[in-house]
Image (tube, helix red, strand yellow):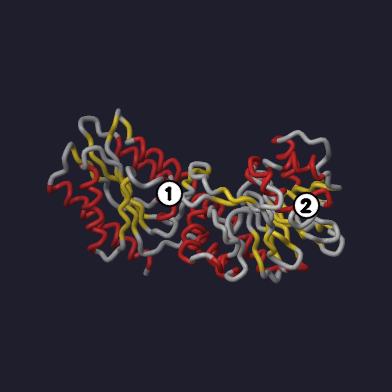
Amino acid sequence: MKDIMNAVKISEKVYWVGAIDWNIRDFHGYTTKRGSTYNAYLVTSEKPTLIDTVKAPFRGEMMARIASVMDPGDIKIIVSNHTEMDHTGALPETIKEVNPEQVFASQAGVKALEEHFTFDREITPVKDGDRINLGNASLTCFETRMLHWPDSMMTYLAEDRLLFSQDGFGMHLASSERFDDEIDPAILEYEAATYFANILLPYSPLILKLLDRLYGLNLPIDVIAPDHGPIWRKDVKGIVESYRRWAVQAPSKKAVVIYATMWRSTELMALALAEGLSGRGIPVKVMSLDVNHRSDVAYEVLDAGILAAGAPTLNNNMFPSMADVLTYLKGLRPQNLIGAAFGSYGWSGESVKQVEAALADMKVELPGEPVKAKNVPGAEELGRCRDLGALLGDRLLEKLE
C-alpha cells in the first residue's frame, strides 16, 4: 500500500495516519451501521512521535500513511493513550519495525499492555501531569481512568493547541472526510450521541469531573483528535458541551416504549400505553425489539424521561430479546428515568414481574402498577395501559416543572 495511502495534515506538527474500517458492524454488542476508523497520529517534532496505533489487521494501512510523511524508522517515541486492542493491536509489530527510543503509557496502561502482549522492552509509565519531551514540543499527560478503561489517558500538545482524546469525543463513523466540518452535522450528532450512550454513559460522573478539570486548567484547545471518527476543528466547544449535557442525564419531555411480542398482544398494550403518553403531550418513541437493536434503544434512552418495557412470558421467563436489552441497559446505568412494566402471558405470567424487577434494579422510578393481560388484551387491559401511560406522563411533567 506504499505510495497509495496518504497521511492527512491536521495541524502544524500533526498528521492523521490511521485506518478506515468500512465494514465493521458490531463493536462490543453495539451496532456500528456506518463502520469506524482507528485513528493514529504522527507528531513531526524533533523526536517524531506516534500517538496510538490501529487494530492489528490495519497495520499496513497505518504504516503506509506514516511512510507518506517520513521513514517510519525515524519515529523516536510511541505513546499509547488507551490499551484496548483496536488501538494497540498493531503496537507490538510496530515497535519491532520502528524500534523507537521509548514507548509510553499510563501506569495502569503499562500493566495492561504487559497483560495483552509480550514485549522485548520496558514500557515507560507516566503519571497524571507528566510531560513527555518531544524536542521542540512536549505532551502533557492527563489520566482519565475509566473513560472508558482503567488505563485511559489523554495527551495535550500545547504547541498546536491539540488534545489527543483517545476514545473520548469519538464516534464509530467510517468516512473519507477527516474533519467535523466536512460531515453532515445531523450524522455527527447522531453518531456522537450513539457512541456516548453505548460506550461512555456509565462513566458520566467521571466525565463531568474531567470536563470541570479541563475548564479549570483553561487549556486553549483548537483541535480534539479522538481515536475513532472525525477530528474536531470547527465545533470543539459544541462537542464538549454535548458531553456535559449527556453526562448530566437531565430527563427531557420524551418517552421510550420498548416491547417484545409473539402474537401482537404485548404490542397492542405498548400502543395503548403510548396513546396515554401522547394524550398528555409527551412525544413517544415506540420500539419493537424485533426490528430495533439494543444500541438503538440506548441511543433513544439517552435523553428520555420515561422508559416503559413490555414482554410476553416464554418458558416462565421474560422474552429473550427483552432480557437482552434490559441487561445491556443496566450496564449502561441510565439515570433519572420514570417507567413501568407490562406484558401478556398464556398461563404462567412471570415476565411482567421480571421486567419490573429489572427496571427497579436500574433505579427507574415506578409510580404505577404494572399491567398484565392473559392471552389477548381486552378493552379493560388496554384501558389500564392507556391510563398507565397517562400516569407516567403526568409524573414526568411534574418532575420537569
Q: Mark 1 — residue?
A: 363
Instruction: Please report the residue visible at 49 percent of the width from the left and 67 percent of the height from the top.
Output: 185
Q: At which x and y percent is residue 257?
A: 32, 52
Badge number at residue 192: none
* Amino acid, disc 1: Lys
In this orientation, which residue lies closer to the viewer: 86 or 28? 86
Q: Position of residue 289 (x, y in %)?
A: 34, 44
Q: Residue under circle 2?
A: 127
Q: For residue 9, which quarter of the picture?
A: bottom right
**Quarter occupied by the C terminus:** bottom left
15 displayed left or right of 226: right
What is the distance, in whole Å, between disc 1 and disc 2 at their CAs?
Answer: 36 Å
Q: Secondary structure at mark 1?
A: loop
Placement of 239 over or under 101, stated as above or below: below
Q: Nearer the viewer, residue 315 or 229?
A: 229
In the image, what residue type sits under mark 2? Answer: Lys
- Horizontal and vertical percent for residue 202? 53, 50
Q: Nearer the viewer, residue 7 or 311?
A: 7
